Amino acid sequence: MRRDNRSRIEDGYGRSRTGMKFMNQPNRVKRVRDCMTCDPATVSPNDSLQRVVELLRRRDIRSVPVLEDGRLIGIVTDRDVRQVAPGYPLLHDEKEIRRYTDRLNVTAAMTADPMTIAPDAPLVDAARVLETYRISSLPVVEGTELVGMLTVTDLLRAFVEQNEETAA
């Protein structure tokens, strides 16, 4: 009898993905690809900041990669949006927020040339980068192609999954 060690996971990007179960593989080095979110939502540098705000709210995420001609050129986080539009998310008038963010494009808020990580990198290396630089997500890049996003939430999910049996 063959046991399947894969499970379906709903991610913050509104998609389900397959994640590895780690508990039955104690000596296996966990890799970024094992718990990253595949096929994340993206924006282009010419999109309005309002599009970013809508993606962040609708998908309940904190960052969006910026692609130009299929190449990662930046990332926009909820923190970046707050710095450019100080009233976000405090402004209660949706029309006022929309008026302001419709006039700005993504490049006004994005962090250019963000830190990235490879899908085959050990998960502990990714955690170290996130902790050292106090960031909440890393674009996962293979060659020049964005293949996923790794967030602190993904790391916590992997940690809980790995330690469930021990805690029970």
Image (cartoon, rainbow, N blue to C red):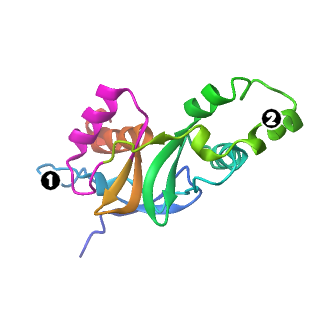
Residue named by callout 1: 28
Kind of residue at badge 2: Ile
Residue 103, how many percent across, how many down? 76, 42
Residue 97, how many percent across, how many down? 80, 35
Q: Residue 98, can we see it?
A: yes
Numbered label tally: 2
Q: Nearer the viewer, residue 102 or 119?
A: 102
Q: Residue at x 46, y 47 (%)?
A: 74
Task: Write down the region rendered in magenta.
Answer: 117-138
Q: Residue 10, can we see it?
A: no
Above or below, comparing residue 129 to residue 9 in the picture: above
Label 1: state its secondary structure.
loop
Residue named by callout 2: 97
Above or below, comparing residue 112 to residue 140 in the picture: above
Mark 1 nearby-residue class (10 Å; few <14, some 14–19, many ≥20) = few
Q: Residue at x 54, y 41 (%)?
A: 76
Verify whether residue 52 appears in magenta.
no
Kind of residue at badge 1: Arg
